[in-house]
Image (tube, rainbow, N blue to C red):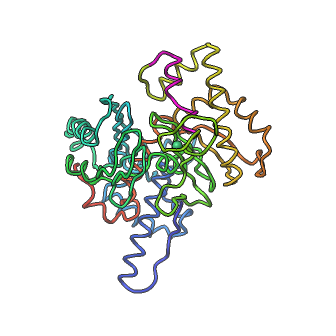
Amino acid sequence: MAMVAVTQTGSGSNNDQVRRHNLSVVLGLAHRTGGLSRAQLTRRTGLNRSTIADLVGELVDRQLVVEAEPDSSGQVGRPSPIVRPNPRAVALAINPEIDAITIGVVGLGGTVLKRVRRPTPVNMSAKEAVDICAAVIFSMRSELDTRYLTVGIGVAVPGLVREQDGLVRLAPHLGWVDEPLAQMLSEATGYPVVAANDASLGALAESTFGSGRDVSDLIYLNGGASGIGGGVIAGGVSLAGITGYAGEFGHTLVNSAGALCHCGAVGCLETEVSRAPLLELVGLQDADADELELALTASGSPAVRAEVERQLGYLAITLRNAINVLNPRLIVLGGFLGSLYAIAPEHLNHILAHQPLVAARQDVTITRTQLASDLLMIGAAELAFESILFDPASARSALRGG
Ligand SMILES: [Zn+2]
C-alpha cells in the first residue's frame, strides 16, 4: 500500500527519520508505477519541488533510480525527465516445485530480465534444491557482478514458511519438513535470502503490479504442480492469520465423498482440482504453465473439455464459499487455474451465476493473473526488495556488484 510523505519538522534525528521515510515513499512510487516525472512525484507526495529534487538526487546516487528522457513524440515543449527504477538493481527469484526449479533475475520495478527453468529429480531434497540453485547462480555470477547490482534472493515456496528466518515448516508435496532453506541458500550463494509462501507472494505481486493494483479486497488462488495455494488481501492488508498460514483454499472441502488428501482430510479442493490429470489427457509428462495451457487449448478432445468443466465445478464451490466469507472485489486465478478459466470462462461464470450468493455476484470480478508465468518470480523478488524499499538509505551496504 502507498505510504504518505511527511514534511520535515522537529529535531535533527527526527529529520533524518523523516528523510529516510520520504526516500522510501519516492522509491516506492517509482517502483510501483515504473516511472514518474519530478512534477508528478511532487503532486503525488505533496512535498515541494526542491525536496523532491534532493530525494531523487540521493536515490540516483544510491543507484536505485535513473532519470531518463521520456518519449517526447507528440508533446509540445520540453518534456521533463522521468524518474524510473534502476533496471540494473535486481533481485534473484527462486521457485522450487516438484517438477522443476525456476530461477529468475528481476529488476526493481518488477521486470523479469531472465528466467531459467531446471527440471528436478524425483523426491528432491532441500539440499539438492539448494545445490541446483547455487549452480545456476554461479553460472550467472560474472553477469550479476558486472551488469547488475544484486540486492539478494527471494524464494517462493509451495508450503508453509516461517518468514522471520525462512525456515520451511512444511512443504508437503516436496516432502520437506523444518528445512532451514533460507540459511542454506545464503551459505551456498553468499547472498542474503528471504522466503515466504508462494501464493502469498503471488497475491502480493498481483496487487502491486497486476490486476489488483487499485483493489483493496482480493483473493488469489494459484494452481501449481504442488497443489493449490491462496492469498487474501482484505481492506488493503495481506491476511496472514496468527502464524502466517491463512489462505489455504486448497484444503477446503469440496467433495465429502472425495479422495483422501495428503493433509489427512477427505475431498479437499486440491484432490479434485489438479494438474496431473490434465497433463495426462494431453499426453505431457512435464510442462510449465504456458506449455500446459497451449496443449489444453489446442486439444479439441471432448475428454479434455469434460475434465476442465469437472475441475471448474469443484473450483466454483471453493469460490462460492470464499465470496460469501470475504466479499472480495476481485478473484485472481493463477497457474493452471488461470488456464482452466481461460479455456471455459462461461462455464465457471454460469455456475457462479446460478448459485445463491449473499455477497452480490455482480460485485465480484474473476480474472486470471495479468503477470502470467512471471507472477511468482515478481512476487519472490518483491520480498527480496522489501528491505531496500522500506529503507533506501540502507542500500549502499545491501547492493553488491556494479
Ligand atoms: Zn487437504
Q: Which residues are magenta?
A: 269-284
Q: For residue 55, what is the image quadrant?
A: bottom left
Q: Would you say the magenta stretch is mainly helix, strand or loop?
A: helix
Given residues 154 and 106, the one toward you in this image is: 154
Task: Identify the residue at horizontal 54%, vertical 44% (top origin).
Answer: 265
Q: Is residue 395 above or below residue 76?
A: below
Is 273 magenta? The answer is: yes
Is 377 magenta? The answer is: no
Q: How many marks?
A: 0
Quarter of the picture holding the N terminus: bottom right
Q: Is residue 211 left or right of residue 56?
A: right
* Percent coordinates x, y for residue 334 in the rendering: 54, 38
Given residues 257 and 276, the one toward you in this image is: 257
* Percent coordinates x, y for residue 271 in the rendering: 54, 35
Q: For residue 101, what is the image quadrant?
A: top left
Q: Is residue 246 left or right of residue 197?
A: right
Task: Identify the residue at horizontal 40%, vertical 63% (top origin).
Answer: 390
Q: Do we see residue 78 in this rendering?
A: no
Task: Identify the residue at horizontal 66%, vertical 49% (top origin).
Answer: 322
* Percent coordinates x, y for residue 250 in the rendering: 55, 43
Q: Is residue 275 left or right of residue 195?
A: right
